[in-house]
Structures are given as structure tokens and as C-alpha cells.
Amino acid sequence: MIIIKYLSKLLKALKSGETPAQLAGGFVLGMIMGLTPFWNLHNLVVFIIILIIRVNISMAILGFAVFSGFAYLLDPLFHNLGFWVLVDINALKNLWTSFYNTTTGSLSNFNNTVVMGSLLISIVLVLPVFFLTKVGVVQYREKIDSRVQKLKVVKILKSSKLYSFYEKINNWRD
């Protein structure tokens, strides 16, 4: 039931009046949370941004889910990049030491190589993923949505009493 509810919301979001930029923004913010270790200060900031600015929360959840899977595979890369930035670049050692000695610095967990590496990678990926997602949403709306609506699975789901009941409840709550 939860999966059907989420897929319904996601398909509605892709067809909704929200701009492709709002959908892509949600996906990118979810990507940042998915690529980086979850229980960190910067993810709290990203979560607050998701709630404050006008982005699609379903796309943020999708971005989080997709990139969380990649994060485990990329942890060695994150560690190596974080180690390089935190330890190998001598010119930055004083900066990191000074930052860590502040309250925000000690709470940020940026001295962790995986946190540092994954945050740097996610920052580098923000613009490419944003624009690719934006183009993907436009392409979905123009070319794919009509085909998805014709699928037998979608027709069966839409004709089921469970889906009708869910839609009534969802429309009532909105």
C-alpha cells in the first residue's frame, strides 16, 4: 500500500503543475542527503531547506532512495577523497583544525573522511544532476507520460476500488 501511495504521488508530481525546476530541486536535495552519511549537521540543514523552499518532497525522497544505494558502493571513493582533502593537502590542515575547534565545526563531523568526501562529490554533482533531472521531467511530460497511462498495470491500478478509495482520501486531505 505504501509503495502504491508513493508511486501515485511520484507520477502525480511528474504530471503536476510544479515546474521542472521544483522537481529537480527536490531530487538534488534528496541526492545530497542520500550520498552523505545521514546523521550529520549538513543533512539537517538540507532537510530544513527541503521544508522551507518550494521543492517536491516526493522527488527528494526518490533522490534520497536512489543515491543512498550508490553511497555504499562509493564509500571507498568518498574516503579517499576526504583523506586527500583533510590530510594530504598540507595547505588546508590549519583551516580544518581551526574549523574543527569551533562549535559548528565539531558538530559538523567534517573531520570524518567519508563525510567530507561524500559532501564534496555531492556538491560537484548538484548542477549536472539538477539539469539532467529537469530535462528528464520535461521529456517525461512530453513523451513518456501518455505511454505510461496506457500501460495495463496503470489502468488496472486506476480502476481498482483501492485506488479510488485512496484518491478520495487523498483529495479530501488536500
Image: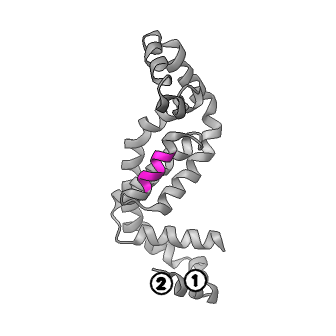
Q: Is the residue marked by circle 1 packed among few (<14), some (14-19), or many (20+) residues within 10 Å? A: some
Residue 99 horizontal/vertical position (percent): 45, 23
Viewer-closest of 87 and 72 = 87
Residue at x 42% of width, y 35% of height: 124
Q: Earlier in the sequence, mark 2 or mark 1?
A: 1
Looking at the picture, does residue 15 appear above or below residue 88? Answer: below
Residue 87 horizontal/vertical position (percent): 54, 15
Which corner quadrant of the image does residue 51 belong to?
Answer: bottom left
Q: Secondary structure at mark 1?
A: helix
Q: Secondary structure at mark 2?
A: helix
Residue placed under numbered mark 1 in the picture = 166
Q: Which mark is residue 171?
A: 2
Does the stretch in magenta take in 49? yes
Residue 46 horizontal/vertical position (percent): 46, 47
Q: Is residue 136 visible?
A: no
How are the residues colored? Answer: one colour
Amino acid of disc 2: Asn
Point out the stretch of residues depicted in magenta. Answer: 44-50
